[in-house]
Amino acid sequence: GAVVSQHPSRVICKSGTSVKIECRSLDFQATTMFWYRQFPKQSLMLMATSNEGSKATYEQGVEKDKFLINHASLTLSTLTVTSAHPEDSSFYICSARDPWGGLREQFFGPGTRLTVL
Amino acid sequence: AQSVAQPEDQVNVAEGNPLTVKCTYSVSGNPYLFWYVQYPNRGLQFLLKYITGDNLVKGSYGFEAEFNKSQTSFHLKKPSALVSDSALYFCAVRDPRHTSGTYKYIFGTGTRLKVLA
């Protein structure tokens, strides 16, 4: 089945630095990728929808200058958390839409745990 | 507004007993409904999906879900629980209408299933 990877799986950084998270579809071309954020014991909150070659669409309340998304190719989307602060610490999950994915539609990455000190 | 509710934060069940994880939704039209499972520090794994047709949908790992339009519910079930089923379960809904961003999912808050040996 389709596989989506994320890198890194865990990252710890100092407050004020920027962190880049990669989301790759390994064996299919993803027309759309989604970025979610998950707080402890809470649901996944959609942050933005990313289409290859165009600007990402951000959900209400998500700062686009804070969370930069680049969907440079049909297999790669990146999320950059700029000037990270402790409140940005979270579990970030991407998903990729495979137009030929049948029932599953979207395939989720394993997540990236960001800890900002 | 579209929403998904999972009324139980946690469900405990003895191994071998049947399990039910509840989900209700509020969506206009005929939504697509999903169940996903998440293991600690992992991404989401697809269990099953309802589009149309038979109200009982069979999915992965012996799980099934029953769609009830009049009650706007989509409860997840399994006839005999295993300890390895212990995980976090998410119900999700997608608007099937083909307009911009329609592949966005709305997730419930998740239900932690604990199967006791």
Image (cartoon, coloured by chain):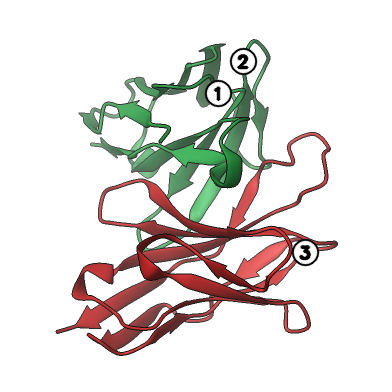
Chain colours: A green, B red
From the image, tell me which residue sits under label 3: B27
Specify the label residue A52 is tagged with: 2
Q: Are marks 1 and 2 in contact (CB under 8 Å)?
A: yes
Q: Is residue A113 left or right of residue A25?
A: left
Using the image, determine if residue B100 lies above or below residue B12. above
Q: Which chain carries label 2?
A: A
Label located before the other in sequence (1 or 2):
1
Asked if A44 appears above or below B79 in the picture, the reply is above
* Residue at the image position 64 percent from the left and 42 percent from the top: A61
Number of residues whose C-alpha sits closer than 10 Å to that of mark 3, classed few (under 14), some (14–19) or many (20 or more): some
Q: Position of residue A84 (x, y in %)?
A: 37, 29
Amino acid under disc 1 = Ala
Q: Nearer the viewer, mark 1 or mark 3?
A: 1
**Disc 1 from disc 2: Cα separation:** 8 Å
Amino acid bearing label 3: Val
In this orientation, which residue lies closer to the viewer: A84 or B51? Answer: B51
Helix, strand or loop at mark 3: loop
Q: Which residue lies furthest to the front in this view?
A: B54
What residue type is disc 2 on? Answer: Glu
Q: How many labels does the image show?
A: 3
* Marks 3 and 2 close (CB-CB < 8 Å): no
Q: Residue at x 43, y 32 (%)?
A: A2
Mark 1 belongs to chain = A
Residue linked to disc 1: A30
Between the C-alphas of marks 1 and 3, the distance is 27 Å
Q: Which image quadrant: the N terminus of chain A? A: top left
Residue A109 found in image quarter: top left
For residue A115, what is the image quadrant?
top left
Chain letter of the residue beneath label 3 in the structure image: B
Local packing at callout 1 (Cα closer than 10 Å; few below 14, some 14-19, many 20+) is: many
Q: Up-down: is B82 above or below B110? A: below
Determine which of the numbered discs, if any, sits on residue B16 in the image: none
